[in-house]
């Protein structure tokens, strides 16, 4: 097993996949159910606009470090399996079903990376699903994304990494994966890493809210 399988070829998964492929020089496979999206990616065409994304995608392909597929069993061939699919609060049961589906394909010595933003109490649920359905005992970690659209590539390379681990094996594996990005890595437990992500979200939401309120008040006052 080698490289990283990224489940979900969206705004979280694709930028991270291509940065790892180029900056860390590691093979990455994106897995998605959308056949047209997979075809575009394999032809070096990003499915959405993001600065630097096309350049990184094409370089990753040229290096032989990137491919996309609809084959879920591709996760079996990778050391790291990162789940980056959206988990909307109203669709949490669908997310759990998806985790269960992929967990049944996981084996020993693999490292599961939860890149999806979740309620803190869902972290233990996700781990329990993985632990129950995997073939063996993969290592579980949380590394939720902390990115802003339009800055994703730069922030993946520069933001401090807040990583949640459950044991020394997870810490070592995530350090080995991320040290090539040359930015600070802070390790904590799996729930705290997710809580930090939710604090980030709340801070940004507050900035948007006060800006909207100021605009509304300005309109009212002419």
Image: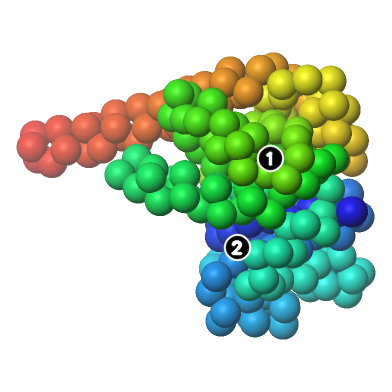
Q: Nearer the viewer, residue 214 or 68?
A: 68
Q: Secondary structure at mark 2?
A: loop
Q: Which mark is residue 9?
A: 2
How many dots with numbers? 2
Residue located beneath label 1 in the image: 113
Residue 89 falls left or right of residue 144:
left
Could you say where residue 184 lies in the image, as x and y percent from the top left?
80, 26
Identify the residue at image location x=70%, y=64%: 73
The C terminus - image quarter: top left
Q: Is residue 163 visible?
A: yes
Q: With respect to residue 2, does 52 lie above or below?
A: below
State whether residue 74 is above or below residue 159: below
The percent coordinates of residue 206 (x first, y second) are 35, 27
Q: Pick the residue in front: 48 or 37.
A: 37
Mark 1 or 2, nearer chain start: 2
For the N terminus, which image quadrant? Answer: bottom right
Label 1 or label 2, whichever lies nearer to me, is 1
Looking at the image, do the residues carrying marks 1 and 2 touch, with CB atoms under 8 Å apart?
Answer: no
- Which percent across, then down, holds residue 63? 91, 69
* Residue 67 point in image, percent of width and height: 77, 71
């Amino acid at each position: 097993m080698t490289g990283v399988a990224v489940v979900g070829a969206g705004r979280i998964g694709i930028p991270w996949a291509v940065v790892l492929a180029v900056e860390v020089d590691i093979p990455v496979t994106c897995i998605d159910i959308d056949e047209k999206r997979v075809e575009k990616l394999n032809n070096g065409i990003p499915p959405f606009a993001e600065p630097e994304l096309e350049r990184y995608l094409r370089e990753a392909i040229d290096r032989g470090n990137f491919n996309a597929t609809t084959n879920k069993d591709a996760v079996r061939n990778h050391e790291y399996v990162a789940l980056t699919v959206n988990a909307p609060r109203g669709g949490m049961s669908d997310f759990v079903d998806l985790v269960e589906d992929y967990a049944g394909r996981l084996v020993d010595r693999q490292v599961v990376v939860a890149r999806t933003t979740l309620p803190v109490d869902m972290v233990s649920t996700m781990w329990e699903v993985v632990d129950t359905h995997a073939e063996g005992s993969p290592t579980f970690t949380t590394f939720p994304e902390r990115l802003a659209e339009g800055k994703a590539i730069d922030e993946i390379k520069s933001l401090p990494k807040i990583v949640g681990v459950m044991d020394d094996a997870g810490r070592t594996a995530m350090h080995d994966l991320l040290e090539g990005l040359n930015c600070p890595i802070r390790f904590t437990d799996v729930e705290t890493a997710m809580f930090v992500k939710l604090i980030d979200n709340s801070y940004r939401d507050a900035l948007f809210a006060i800006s909207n309120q100021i605009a509304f008040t300005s309109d009212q006052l002419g």
